[in-house]
Every structure is written in C-alpha cells, then in structure tokens.
Image (spheres, helix red, strand yellow):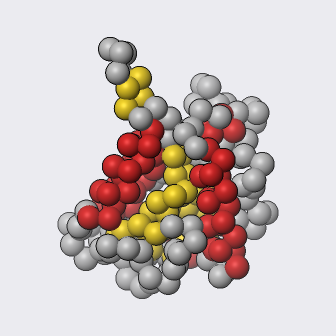
C-alpha cells in the first residue's frame, strides 16, 4: 500500500502545455484558456505551481516545439520539472519538489490526456497523493488505429474524466473539477 500523504496542502501541476504538443491537440485554445484560468486562480490563492516540460527527439530542449505556449509561461519563482517519460514522476525530481512544499494534494492540468496526464494521475494516486483532475484543462489528439478507424480525442478526455471521478484508492481522495470551480483546499473536486 502507498504511503498516504498527510495534510491538505495543494500544488498545481501543469504538464506539457508546449507548442509542439498543443499544435496537434483537440480543442487546444479552449483547453489553454482553461489551464490559464486555473493557473491564475492558483497564483491568486498562493498555491505553488509546478511546470512539467517534456522532451523527446521531436521536441529537443530549446527548440520552438519544446517552448511553453505563449498563454502559459512559468513565473521566475515557479518550479520547473523536466521529463522524458509519460509520467511526471518517472526519473524526475517532482516528488522532491512536492515534499519540499509539503503537498499532499495535486491539482492536474495539461496534455496529452491518454499518455502524460493519465500516467501522472495514476502515478500521483499510486504514491499516496490526493488528486483533482481539472477536467476542462487537459486534452490530447485523435488516435489513428491504422485500420481505418480512430479514437476521438474528446472520447479519451471524457474517459479519463469519468475514471478520475469514480476511481477509488484507500486513504486518498480523487475527483474532477472545472477551471472555474476548482477549490485547491478541498482535494478531489466532484465525486
């Protein structure tokens, strides 16, 4: 069983809202706007922000694709974490930063829903954190199955929103909230 994190201190983790990612994402401008609204709310409430930035061969560090979308720029005093795997926890110092601020509750926004957001959400729950998925501030792209069919991005987003609303882990609270209604002091949002 995972170590359950004590306390109710929150952190907002924004994952991969980068130019190269969002260029192919479904409903990207709406999601960027909602993520920006969530960031503004967190900053106004003094909630620590952690920005997770992905790199791979298509998005090498420093490239135009690797940069944050213009609407979402980390402030100089906000934490940055760099990753090479889907989960923001794997081979990164994310947990060290969360421990430093005493976070027990992660609010999560970003991209891509089916890869990095899903892996980070489950990674947080597996490590004993409470989780609120900002259900209108994450997105992905359609998946072409190569056989003439595809999985629509909107279905992938809906699937994770449903899973995070109804999933249960012992000793943890998880759920969803919108960018307009998220309460960083109450883990889990809506059940």
Say which residue appears at 53% left-offset and 75% top-offset. Answer: 181
Tell me residue 59's x, y (percent).
Answer: 64, 31
Is residue 87 visible in the rendered structure shown here? no
Judge by depth and name the residue closer to the eye, 127 or 165.
165
Q: Quadrant of the C terminus?
A: bottom left
Is 6 in front, or is 147? 147
> Between residues 1 and 41, which one lies in front from this camera angle?
41
Q: Quadrant of residue 161?
A: bottom left
Residue 130 in the figure: left or right of residue 77: left
- Answer with left or right where residue 24 lies relative to residue 2: right
Which residue sits furthest top?
A: 147
Q: Residue at x 72, y 55 (%)?
A: 72
Instruction: Pinpoint residue 9: horizontal percent, then vertical percent.
Output: 50, 81
Image location (x, y in percent) of residue 26? 54, 39
139 sits left or right of 57 in the view: left
Q: Residue at x 50, y 84 (%)?
A: 185
**Where is residue 131, by image quadrant?**
bottom left
Can you tell which quarter of the image residue 114 is in? Answer: top left
Q: Measured from the top left, where is residue 99 in percent x and y?
A: 50, 72
Q: Residue at x 65, y 82 (%)?
A: 45
Position of the N terminus, as image quadrant, is bottom left
In the depicted structure, whether residue 146 falls above or below residue 108: above
- Between 69 and 147, the one nearer to me in the picture: 147
Q: Please indicate, yes or no, whether residue 118 appears anywhere in the rendered image.
A: yes
């Amino acid at each position: 069983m995972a170590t359950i994190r004590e306390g109710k201190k929150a952190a907002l983790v924004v994952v991969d809202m980068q130019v190269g990612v969002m260029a192919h994402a479904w409903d990207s401008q709406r999601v960027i706007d909602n993520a920006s609204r969530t960031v503004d709310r967190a900053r106004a409430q003094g909630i620590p922000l952690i920005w997770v930035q992905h790199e791979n061969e298509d998005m090498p560090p420093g490239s135009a694709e690797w940069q944050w979308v213009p609407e979402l720029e980390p402030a100089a005093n906000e934490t940055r974490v760099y990753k090479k795997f889907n989960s923001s926890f794997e081979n990164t110092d994310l947990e060290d930063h969360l421990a430093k601020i005493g976070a027990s509750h992660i609010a999560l926004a970003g991209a891509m829903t089916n890869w990095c957001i899903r892996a980070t959400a489950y990674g947080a729950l597996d490590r004993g954190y409470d989780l609120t998925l900002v259900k209108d501030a994450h997105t992905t792209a359609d998946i072409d199955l190569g056989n003439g069919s595809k999985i629509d991005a909107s279905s992938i987003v809906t699937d994770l929103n449903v899973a995070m609303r109804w999933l249960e882990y012992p000793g943890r609270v998880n759920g969803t909230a919108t960018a307009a209604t998220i309460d960083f002091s109450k883990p889990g949002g809506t059940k």
